[in-house]
């Protein structure tokens, strides 16, 4: 198989250089393009640089900014958005590298003779060499100018998009990828493209790259170490001190040579072979290596199957550094030495001396230079070369440096080598050979059809001018007019604005082009070609192949497309100084809080309100009936367990959902206003787990089933949950019936899901007077009220001053040789705690108990090697063991009391006393009560409640030094869907408080979401909400502080005062301490101000947008304002009111921000779903008017509705309907 | 077993069925004849924006549904048909209860009568069960807002007097997790406020022939098997019992639901336990 690859098209765009001929003029004259950074670009950058310096962590107070010299483009901030299917806004938010590379590749296709029509649907590959260079990306810049556009800018700044966008735009179906091997990237991309062509992944390929230097600031902090002192690159010269910056872009179009010849493509040169390798493990990752470079050349020559002695020109990487040049020279010498001892036969040079170093783009620029050398059959002088570097011994090797332009004589085909080396050690080399195009056959046709096209009229006019200039410069003197016309037809005919001329010779063509510029009219003659011309101008598809006839037409050099470029750059605002000083210093807030039961005044004694109807559910095995009777609840019904719900019906069974549905029906039918749930009224705590389970099923699950039934029936009631000494009124209170306290947590959630059931939890002892209980049942207050005799308390959320973290040394709570059990132990939180413990006290046994456990030890090595998800956990355990700890993994479900008890007993048998326990096992709540299945409810509660009970029972004889229960913010501030989770955690909080002062330290920690690990991360709820998510290090510090203290409970989480959800804190039936409440108040006002300012800013920005509407006559005010919103988003100066959001360049990512702008500007609720449904200015405006109208009616009707006669309401509706029908 | 579902008003979009009318020239001509205007022009281009108007939207949706239904039933054997509100007419046509022409005549008249009841509106309520919505409506004390569609477990529409509807919407929006979105229709469809239309439509129905169903149709009025034209009269004032319809179909052994046009009903089916 012939593996030759043809270069069939190219483009090159460098400072003062557009096209191969201009490039050759610079090369052949030995010109260096290095110069100072252009003044215009300095001016635009100055403010931004000052901003960066002022705001850096270590501010630089240097008034002057110094720039490197280099080969800089005059402008990098313009773009022809329409030619690339973008809108002005997208263009503005797209990395200029992307824009330049796109332009380069499209020009190369055109040069190759391929218009968009010819390319569409073809298996063409796109290979781009590109890297994101940290710290100075366009995305960094735009995010600093306007952080709100970050999301919108994503698609224009992801490197992969660089290749993908071109494939998308031109509908190219071959591979589309970005290669990043640093400075060798584009040459490696050539190698990849070659291989893709040879294996058949694609039939044609474009390889491109681009480089701009955003801010070439000269400062010691920002140097890589290869920069030339004056921006001039003096490769191989004695004075070489590094490489100068270069900017520009280049691209080549590749095809298999046999295909290219068959397809009639122009062939610039032929890639005979190539190779890519890596330095391997050299001294440092950035050190080049001559051995690897020699190997590279040998491999490339083998691949090319050429005799290296026939290579007459070598385009070296040549960065002109002290280290790099000698190593490269040495590598080349060594490689040639394997084949020949001849000396001085191969000229060496590098284009970096002319145009600077284009980094990732440099490889393809070197390749294009080699093409120019071959095409011109001349060896150019090496720029900036006067005295050879004495460390390079040219005389003894095959290379010489040319100092003048001279013809390149050769007996066989001329050959070049091109090298590029990446900073990280990836090297590439390509062998290129000249190609002699067969002479063109003369054309016998008397007339030819010449066409041009462009996306805009401006481009078309400029093109016509360029062609006239090209003709006047002799550009068509050596080619057949038939080939010129053929070239324009296959490569320049796809765009909307068109020229078609039937011409007889070059002079005729020039005359017709000049005439076009004068009157713009095209009058094709009445001939066959004239008919084609008319059809083409009318936009009809033309079969150009048929038109070409039998003659083998060729693609020839013609002027490239002239882009209609306009400014596409985010302007850096010069107002940053004033804005900067506005930022306020964040207040510091404590991480730790607590919930205290604080005394509140007794309620006034009340009679039973008129119309109140009470239903009390009670357990006849308790004293509830006596207490309720004593309270005197008026016309109340007492429903005892087992008694018929309705006369003659089945007995009341609180564990049966059907029974509770009957209760709910009773509530609805008998218009019950108050339900008292008094089933959990046991006098003393359960003493075995069976009793705990029985009470759980009767009391907590019963309350759950009742609530669910009441919700499903849609009733509205006041629900009092009455318990007896279930809540620990004071830390260490004896005799607390802890299991019934879980009902408190449950009750906190009900109203958050269904506001028509308002819950108060009243916990009493038998000393509470009857009238006090009656007052509670009928009071308007909700939340938890703990009554002991005449004392009444409720929950207050308070700050806890930062605990002392500074404690040194191994903590007293961890004993050398101790055994510590962690439930949920193989979860991320459990392992973090284990690691913290072992770090503080390595000589301990850690027992990790979890449902899943870990795989058996003999499989660990394999798991780690295979990168299994278990690998991280295994690694942590190994790390703990390497520090001297003993780690035992016990698989057991803490939510299964029997299995859990067996596991704990087993641990005790094996390791003796448990010295400490961290109960971190837990399952999150899953859904709102209406849709919660009882079995799932059970699972969530048992792993907290039952497990804690079992632990306590089994360690009663010898209590651990500490038991830390991991509870949750949900026990204080639960969200909808967390009723079971809140119940289980409230149980833990209450249990810990009840055990205060006991033989072991029991502490409950109410964690907010952990930021980096754990349940919240697994469920994606680890963002900041009312509270800031907790970093692991701080969480562990709080745990340490809690264990060092004697507190029974600590709430761990910092309030997110500046967040938008802080107002929710006040929506809970938990009193806020005065200092917290004051801060919430202050921040809510500040937030309001910020939102108001933000919306005012959006409104004024939108108001300032100038846009013209099109599509019909006359537009409504709403259409104008919607038009401004879309114009702001897309940047178009004119918008059609029927244009589709997606056709304008919208995507679902930007839709959210556009919808929010529209909502703000029109003062209605309008979201992304609305926008995606409406899609045109007309429809959006129509929808907004509907919404506004709707809001008006609602406001109008805020007046008391009873008084509004029905007819009036209807006619108001009619009036509105009529108004909306008007244009 | 498979069931084919037909959506109702609300799925209309400019451009719908654009490539359909050429494939069914006979049916399209018939429809044009009955309606007195070009249904293809209305659906595909709608230059005068008539699809917003119930009078035009209903026949348009019906015709597009019907043509798509012809395509589907030619390819697949369905065990059941069902349709949401207006879509129920398509289900009856597919099942052979009504012929296409009769169906379209009824729909045209139905659309005119429904469009004649003004001053009302509808809103979609998402995120909360219908029991919550009913309770919220009761709490507002408003007499002229009703539950109009029971679409899925937590998707309901309410309808009624336009002014009262706005107030009710605000009250419901307070429910945690709920979202209330006004729907762009002119009348208080599927509520007792449609009584004037119902009486007149009952007379219209009397003049049309209803044949026995070749394939069973589950009615969106009752959630039971369709059992006669009286249901179509009641449909105007009765809520759309879509949840019940889906449960009945599932209980009858339907495992796969196809939807003739769009995905509205499919998503409702998926959101129903």
Image (cartoon, grey):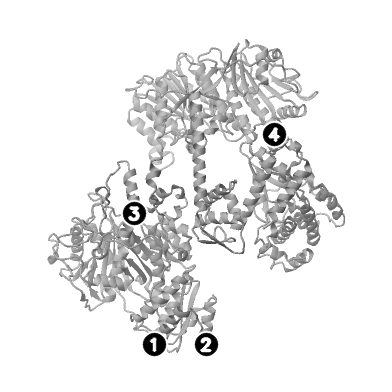
> Which of pointers 1 and 3 indicates the residue nearer the eye?
3
Marks 2/1: CA distance?
Answer: 22 Å
Q: Is tag 4's residue or tag 2's residue first in the polypeptide sequence?
A: 2
Mark with earlier residue (3, 4): 3
In-image side of A53 versus A541 (left or right): left
Mark 4 and mark 2: Cα distance apart in space: 83 Å
In this rendering, which labeled residue sits more in front, label 4 or label 2? 2
**Residues indicated by labels 2 and 1 sit on the same polypeptide chain:** yes
Image-based side of B98 in relation to B135, left or right: right
**For mark 3, what is the residue?**
A45
Distance between mark 3 and mark 4 Cα atoms: 64 Å
Q: Name the residue under label 4.
A: A712
Residue that badge 2 annotates: A527
Task: Examine the rendered structure and indicate whether residue A479 appears above or below residue A684.
Answer: below
Tag 2 or tag 3, which sits nearer the N-term? Answer: 3
Please rate how many residues cluster around mark 3, counting C-alpha atoms within 10 Å: few if below 14, some from 14 to 19, many from 20.
some
């Amino acid at each position: 198989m012939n593996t030759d690859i043809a270069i069939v098209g190219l483009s090159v765009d460098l400072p003062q250089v557009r096209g191969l001929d201009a490039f050759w003029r610079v090369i052949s004259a030995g010109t260096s393009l290095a110069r100072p950074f252009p003044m215009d670009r300095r001016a635009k950058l100055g403010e931004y640089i000052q901003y960066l310096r002022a705001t850096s962590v270590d501010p630089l107070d240097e008034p002057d900014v110094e720039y490197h010299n280099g080969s800089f483009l005059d402008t990098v901030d313009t773009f022809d958005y329409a030619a690339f299917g973008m809108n002005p806004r997208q263009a503005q938010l797209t990395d200029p590298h992307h824009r330049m590379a796109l332009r380069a590749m499209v020009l190369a296709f055109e040069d190759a003779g391929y218009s968009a029509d010819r390319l569409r649907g073809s298996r063409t590959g796109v290979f781009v060499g590109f890297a994101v260079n940290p710290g100075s990306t366009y995305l960094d810049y735009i995010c600093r100018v306007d952080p709100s556009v970050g999301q919108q800018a994503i698609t224009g700044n992801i490197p992969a998009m660089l290749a993908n966008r071109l494939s998308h735009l031109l509908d190219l179906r071959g591979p589309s990828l970005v290669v990043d091997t640093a400075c060798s990237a584009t040459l490696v991309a050539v190698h990849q493209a070659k291989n893709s062509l040879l294996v058949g992944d694609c039939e044609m390929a474009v390889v491109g790259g681009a480089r701009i230097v955003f801010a070439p600031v000269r400062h010691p902090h920002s140097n890589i170490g290869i920069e030339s002192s004056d921006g001039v690159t003096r490769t191989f010269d004695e004075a070489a001190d590094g490489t100068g910056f270069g900017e520009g872009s280049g691209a080549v179009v590749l095809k298999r040579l046999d295909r290219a010849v068959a397809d009639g493509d122009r062939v610039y040169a032929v890639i005979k072979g190539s190779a890519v390798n890596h330095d391997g493990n050299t001294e440092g990752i950035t050190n080049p290596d001559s051995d690897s470079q020699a190997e590279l050349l040998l491999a490339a020559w083998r691949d090319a199957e050429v005799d290296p002695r026939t290579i007459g020109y070598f385009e070296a990487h040549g960065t002109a550094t002290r280290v790099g040049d000698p190593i490269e020279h040495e590598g080349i010498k060594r490689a040639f030495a394997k084949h020949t001892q001849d000396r001085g036969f191969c000229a060496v040079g590098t284009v970096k001396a002319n145009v600077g170093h284009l980094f990732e783009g440099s490889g393809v620029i070197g390749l294009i230079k080699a093409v120019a050398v071959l095409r011109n059959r001349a060896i150019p002088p090496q720029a900036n070369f006067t005295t050879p570097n004495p460390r390079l011994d040219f005389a003894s090797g095959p290379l010489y440096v040319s100092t003048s332009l001279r013809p390149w004589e050769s007996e066989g085909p001329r050959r070049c080598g091109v090298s590029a080396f990446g900073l990280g050690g990836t090297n590439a080399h390509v062998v290129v050979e000249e190609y002699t195009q067969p002479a063109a056959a003369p054309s016998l046709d008397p007339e030819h059809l010449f066409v041009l096209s462009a996306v805009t009229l401006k481009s078309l006019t400029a093109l016509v001018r360029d062609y006239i200039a090209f003709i006047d410069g002799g550009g068509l003197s050596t080619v057949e007019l038939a080939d010129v016309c053929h070239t324009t037809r296959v490569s320049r005919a796809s765009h909307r604005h068109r020229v078609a001329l039937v011409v007889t010779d070059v002079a005729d063509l020039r005359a017709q082009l000049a005439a076009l510029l004068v009157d713009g009219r095209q009058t094709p003659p009445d001939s066959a070609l004239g008919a084609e011309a008319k059809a083409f101008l009318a936009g009809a598809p033309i079969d150009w192949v048929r038109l070409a006839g039998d003659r083998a037409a060729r693609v020839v050099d013609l002027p490239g497309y002239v882009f209609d470029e306009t400014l596409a750059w985010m302007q850096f605002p010069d107002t940053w100084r004033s804005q900067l000083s506005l930022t306020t210093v964040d207040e510091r807030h404590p991480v730790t809080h607590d919930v205290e039961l604080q005394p509140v005044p007794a309620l006034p004694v009340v009679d039973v309100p008129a119309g109140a109807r009470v239903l009390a559910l009670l357990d006849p095995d308790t004293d509830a009936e006596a207490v309720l009777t004593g309270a005197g609840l008026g016309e109340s019904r007492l429903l005892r367990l087992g008694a018929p719900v309705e006369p003659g019906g089945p007995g009341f069974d609180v564990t049966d959902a059907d029974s509770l549905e009957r209760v709910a029906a009773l509530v609805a039918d008998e218009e019950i206003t108050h339900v008292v749930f008094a089933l959990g009224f046991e006098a003393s705590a359960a003493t075995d787990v069976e009793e705990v389970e029985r009470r759980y099923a009767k009391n907590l699950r019963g309350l759950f089933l009742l609530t669910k039934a009441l919700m499903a029936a849609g009733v509205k009631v006041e629900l009092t949950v009455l318990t007896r000494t279930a809540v620990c009124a004071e830390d260490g209170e004896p005799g607390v019936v802890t299991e019934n306290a879980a009902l408190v947590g449950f009750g906190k959630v009900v109203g958050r899901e269904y506001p028509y059931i308002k819950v108060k939890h009243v916990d009493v002892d038998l000393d509470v007077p009857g009238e006090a209980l009656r007052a509670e049942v009928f009071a308007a207050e909700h939340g938890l009220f703990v009554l002991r005799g005449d004392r009444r308390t409720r929950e207050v959320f308070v700050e806890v001053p930062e605990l002392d973290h500074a404690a040194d040394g191994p903590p007293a709570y961890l004993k050398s040789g101790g055994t510590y059990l962690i439930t949920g132990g193989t979860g991320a939180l459990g392992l973090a705690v284990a690691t913290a413990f072992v770090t503080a006290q390595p000589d301990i046994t850690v027992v990790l108990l979890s449902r899943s456990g870990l795989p058996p030890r003999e499989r660990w090595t394999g798991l780690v090697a295979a990168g299994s998800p278990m690998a991280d956990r295994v690694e942590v355990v190994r790390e703990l063991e390497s520090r001297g700890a003993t780690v035992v993994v016990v698989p057991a479900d803490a939510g299964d009391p029997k299995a859990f008890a067996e596991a704990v007993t087993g641990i005790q048998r094996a390791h003796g006393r448990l010295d400490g326990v961290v109960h971190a096992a837990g399952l999150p709540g899953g859904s709102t009560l209406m849709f919660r299945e009882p079995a799932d409810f059970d699972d969530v509660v048992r792993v907290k409640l039952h497990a804690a009970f079992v632990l306590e029972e089994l360690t009663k004889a010898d209590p651990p030094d500490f038991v830390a229960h991991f509870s949750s913010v949900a026990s204080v501030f639960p969200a909808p869907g967390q009723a079971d989770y809140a119940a289980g955690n409230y149980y833990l909080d209450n249990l810990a408080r009840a055990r205060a002062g006991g033989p072991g330290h029991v502490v409950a920690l109410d964690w907010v979401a952990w930021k980096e690990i754990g349940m919240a991360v697994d469920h994606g709820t680890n963002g900041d909400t009312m509270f800031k998510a907790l970093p692991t290090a701080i969480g562990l510090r709080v745990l340490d502080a809690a264990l060092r203290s004697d507190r029974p409970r600590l709430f761990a989480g910092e309030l997110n005062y500046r967040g938008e959800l802080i107002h929710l804190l006040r929506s809970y039936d938990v009193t806020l301490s005065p200092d917290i409440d004051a801060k919430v108040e202050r921040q809510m006002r500040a937030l309001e101000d910020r939102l108001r300012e933000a919306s005012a800013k959006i409104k004024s920005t939108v108001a300032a947008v100038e846009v013209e509407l099109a599509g019909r006559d006359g537009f409504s005010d709403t259409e104008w304002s919607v038009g401004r919103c879309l114009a702001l988003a897309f940047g178009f100066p004119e918008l059609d009111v029927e244009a589709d959001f997606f056709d304008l360049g919208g995507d679902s990512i930007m839709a959210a921000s556009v919808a929010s702008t529209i909502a703000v500007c029109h003062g209605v609720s309008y979201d992304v779903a609305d926008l995606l449904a409406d899609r045109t200015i007309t429809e959006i405006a129509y929808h907004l008017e509907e919404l506004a109208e709707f809001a008006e009616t609602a406001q109008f009707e805020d007046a008391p509705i009873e008084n509004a006669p029905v007819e009036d309401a209807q006619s108001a509706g009619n009036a509105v309907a009529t108004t909306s029908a008007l244009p | 077993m498979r069931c084919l579902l037909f959506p109702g008003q609300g799925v209309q979009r400019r451009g719908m069925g654009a490539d359909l009318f050429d494939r069914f020239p006979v049916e399209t001509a018939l429809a044009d004849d009955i309606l007195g205007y070009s249904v293809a022009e209305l659906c595909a281009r709608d230059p005068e924006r008539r699809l917003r108007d119930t009078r035009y939207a209903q026949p348009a949706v019906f015709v597009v549904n019907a043509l798509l239904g012809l395509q589907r039933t030619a390819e697949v054997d369905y065990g059941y048909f069902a349709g949401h509100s207006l879509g129920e007419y398509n289900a009856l046509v597919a099942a052979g209860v009504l012929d296409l022409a009769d169906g379209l005549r009824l729909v045209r008249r139905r659309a005119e009568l429904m469009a004649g009841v003004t001053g009302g509106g509808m809103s979609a309520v998402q995120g909360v069960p219908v029991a919550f919505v009913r309770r919220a409506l009761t709490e507002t004390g408003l007499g002229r807002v009703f539950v109009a569609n029971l679409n899925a477990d937590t998707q309901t529409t309410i309808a009624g007097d336009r002014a009262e509807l706005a107030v009710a919407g605000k009250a419901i929006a307070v429910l945690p997790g709920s979202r209330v979105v006004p729907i762009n229709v002119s009348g208080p469809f599927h509520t007792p406020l449609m009584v004037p239309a119902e009486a007149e439509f009952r007379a219209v129905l009397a003049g049309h022939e209803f044949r026995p169903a070749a394939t069973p149709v589950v009615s969106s009025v009752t959630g039971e098997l369709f059992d006669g034209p009286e249901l179509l009269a009641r449909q105007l004032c009765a809520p759309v019992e879509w949840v019940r319809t889906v449960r009945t179909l599932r209980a009858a052994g339907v495992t796969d639901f196809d939807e003739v046009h769009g995905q509205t009903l499919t998503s409702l089916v998926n959101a129903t336990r």
